[in-house]
Amino acid sequence: MTLFILQTHKKYKTEEWLQFIFKSDEIFHKCDLVTRPENPKFFAKCINELDSHCGEEIFNSIVNENNISKKCCGKLVKMGEECHTNMAKALIRTPEMRNIDAIEFLKKNKILFDDCRTME
């Protein structure tokens, strides 16, 4: 995609392509690091700590701004922020989430966790 833009857009025809390609790769790498879940064994343990009902409620709270029950908030806090963040990172990497703003999703993820923590 970057190469196509460099080849066809008037603004970039005279520019040094290598600099743009390097910058594009650097941005991709940073995004990859931000959304990569941590240790797979730890992540597997996190998945087992949350039932599908609360998982769906948490997801809908972040994506659709739906309310979350006190019960599911409690499970979320018990699971821990690190687990919650890793699950969000893994979710961002799925094809179904490709049109979601990853940074905004992670911000909402953090806000939800903090809100649930104060409910306890």
Image (cartoon, rainbow, N blue to C red):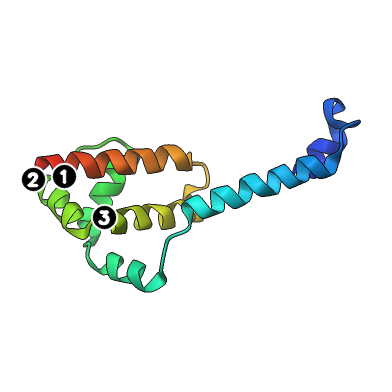
> For numbered disc 3, what is the local secondary structure?
helix
> Label 2 sits on what residue type?
Glu
Which residue reaches farthest bottom? 41
Q: Residue 109 location in percent, x, y?
A: 32, 43
Residue at the spot x=45%, y=40% of the render? 103
Q: Horizontal placement of 87 versus 31: left or right?
A: left
Q: Please report contact status of discs 1 and 3: CB closer than 8 Å, yes or no.
A: no
* Nearer-the-camera pick, 85 or 65: 85
**Residue 54, numbered circle:** none
Q: Which residue carries the number 2 mark?
A: 120
Residue at the spot x=69%, y=49% of the render? 25
> Label 3 sits on what residue type?
Gly
Q: Which residue carries the number 1 mark?
A: 117
> Label 1 sits on what residue type?
Arg
Q: Horizontal placement of 71 versus 112: left or right?
A: left
**Residue 55, numbered circle:** 3
Lower sequence index among marks 2 and 3: 3
Q: Residue 120 location in percent, x, y?
A: 8, 45
Name the image quarter holding residue 10. Answer: top right
Give neighbour class at mark 1: few <14, some 14-19, many 20+ (Cα, 10 Å): some
Give neighbour class at mark 3: few <14, some 14-19, many 20+ (Cα, 10 Å): some
Separation (CA) of disc 1 from disc 3: 17 Å
* Nearer-the-camera pick, 92 or 85: 85
Q: Horizontal placement of 84 versus 71: left or right?
A: right
Quarter containing the N terminus: top right
Q: Which of labels 1 and 3 is toward the front?
A: 1
Residue at the spot x=83%, y=45% of the render? 18
Q: Residue 65 location in percent, x, y?
A: 29, 35
Lower sequence index among marks 1 and 3: 3
Q: Please report contact status of discs 1 and 2: CB closer than 8 Å, yes or no.
A: yes
Which residue reaches farthest left? 120
Q: Which of labels 2 and 3 is toward the front?
A: 2
